Amino acid sequence: MAEVVIPIGPQHPALKEPVNFRIIADGEKIVRLELDLSYNHRGIEKAAEQRNFIRVLPLLERVCGICSHSHATNFAKGVEEIMALEIPPRARYIRTIIAELERMHSHLLWLGVAAHEIGFNTLFMWTWRDREAVQDTLEEMSGNRVHYGMNEIGGVRRDLTPAQIQAALSRLPVLEERVRQYREMVESEETLLMRFRGVGRLSKEEVLKYGAVGPTARASGVDYDVRKDDPYLAYAEVPFNVVTDTSGDVYGRTRVRVGELGESLKIVRYCLEHIPEGPIRADAPHTAPEGETLSRYEAPRGELAHFIRTNGTDKVERIDIRTPTLANWTSVAVCLVNQNLADIPVIVAAIDPCLSCTSRLTVVNRNDGTAGVVTFDELRRRRDRQWDRQELR
């Protein structure tokens, strides 16, 4: 076997963000994938620990632009749990509406990107046209198209007016018809069927073994969704179905996401039509008692987890973020094996990767190549010693 190493990234025309792939191939078949996720580390978790609860929410929205509401809501939900603070029903419904609009925004964006990867640019333009209606609704409700800034500890910052609710409801029939067309297209369009069926297959056993989440897991028959299995916000009151598939390939992940578009439309319509009256925030204390929690949230890409520890101050002592993209990377390495080189773009795109979500830092000894754990104080001491040496020169 003559193995060939094909480097992709960290700067590459096909990549929107920096990541370093090393594809090892034998002819046209992929033997294995070597992946470096830590090319760019932003240190958001450590920066979050230096800010109070008010200032940290806008920062956490910047973990990921497409999932900005997911991170802010998950953090606020966790801190409110430690405070034993219950937010008003109207705030729960508003958070749910924004969450499902964000899911639609994410899935429409993904469907367009997936179509673009196989040269189906007509579908790319259609889905991004419909995504504009979703973003227009988000902008009317929050004032922003990407980072919505709706959350605060104890509820939401903005209420929905009757005019905003009516404008959102007026857009839903067109979106419902378009999603129905996309569902039919996925079932019958030859371009999609030829490029997606049987590609990047992942069995249910492999999903459970490697911890895949979200549409990636549900496309392999894993009926798991945090909104159903551990309800939060208004999900316990809203009727909706968890969309699953059994094909376990890129085609199945496409069907799941298109199906979830329809379910999100149902959730948004229900919440807009049944939104309770009342206040949009509860009075929250400036500090949180000592405590810790694992806050879970079904982001568009899958289960998002925030581990939060508080120490009686107005800041978190520790926050650790496990994003769905980080959970799904191992499944990419598994389902790329024995696939064709030409299928790399659609297999990687099928998990809807967000590389900025996966920023991690690994400390490696230059002398022997071993990796280890270094405390923040030790990093600071090493930094100071490096600066001292530069001053001496």
Image: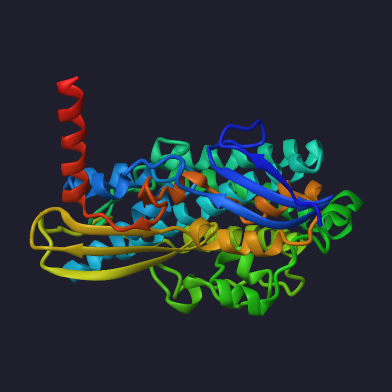
Q: Which residue is drawn at 64% across and 59% down?
A: 332
On screen, 320 above or below 166? below
Q: Viewer-proximal residue, 2 or 327?
A: 2
- Return the residue found at the far top: 393
Quadrant of the image occupied by residue 184: bottom right
Q: Residue at x 67, y 55 (%)?
A: 350
Is 367 left or right of 12, judged from the image as shown?
A: left
| Colouring of the image | rainbow
Q: Position of residue 128 (x, y in %)?
A: 67, 38
Based on the displayed image, in which of its 4 quarters is residue 85 positioned? bottom left
The C terminus, quarter of image: top left
Percent x, y for residue 358? Answer: 46, 51
Residue 150 coordinates in the image, percent (x, y): 34, 47
Q: Residue at x 33, y 67 (%)?
A: 295
Q: Which of 286 and 215 is in front in this view?
A: 215
> From the viewer's perspective, is 181 left or right of 19?
right
- The image quadrant where one finds the N terminus is bottom right
Query: Of 226 and 50, which appears nearest the observer?
Result: 50
**Observer able to see residue 365:** yes
